[in-house]
Image (cartoon, grey):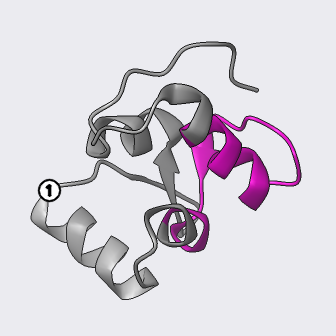
Amino acid sequence: MIPNDDLIWHAIERVSDGTRPLVLTVAQVATILNVSGLTVRRMIAKGDLAAQRFLGAVRIPAAEVFRVLGAEPSGEAG
């Protein structure tokens, strides 16, 4: 079952103090996907999850969470 975008946004808001950020931390994505941070880092290393580095910190675009879960984001982020 593919979760709808409202459920995904709710999960993102839950781990980010009620906001809809454009990028998420490894820990936030791990919580949303219910996996470990190591699993998220492995997904990044394999190319299964796109991420960027900002001053040494890894950030994952919120849209990547939707892509991994097979959904399309709707609504405004930020």
The stretch of residues the image draws in magenta is: 8-29
- Where residue 12 appears, x then y in whole percent? 65, 48
Considering every residue shown, the one lying at the far right of the view is 17
Location of residue 77 with respect to 29 vertically, above or below: above
What residue is pinned by disc 1? 47
What residue lies at 55% left-to-right and 40% top-to-bottom? 8
Q: Quadrant of the N terminus?
A: top left
**Residue in front for this viewpoint, 2 or 64:** 2
Q: Tell me if residue 9 is in the magenta stretch.
A: yes
- Where residue 45 appears, x then y in whole percent? 19, 69
Left or right: 45, with 72 as reference point: left
In this rendering, the count of numbered labels is 1
Left or right: 12, with 72 as reference point: right
- Where residue 63 appears, x then y in whole percent? 44, 32
Left or right: 16, with 60 as reference point: right
**Residue in front for this viewpoint, 5 or 21:** 5
Considering every residue shown, the one lying at the far front of the view is 1
Q: Tell me if residue 15 is in the magenta stretch.
A: yes
Q: Quadrant of the C terminus?
A: top right
**Residue in front for this viewpoint, 59 or 16:** 16
Considering every residue shown, the one lying at the far top of the view is 75
Which of the 4 image quarters holds residue 65? top left
What residue lies at 42% left-to-right and 85% top-to-bottom? 36
Location of residue 8 with respect to 57 vertically, above or below: above
What residue lies at 64% left-to-right and 13% top-to-bottom? 75
What residue lies at 23% left-to-right and 77% top-to-bottom? 42
**Residue in front for this viewpoint, 11 or 1:** 1
- Where residue 29 appears, x then y in whole percent? 51, 62
Q: Label 1 amino acid?
A: Gly
Location of residue 38 with respect to 30 vertically, above or below: below
Left or right: 51, with 8 as reference point: left
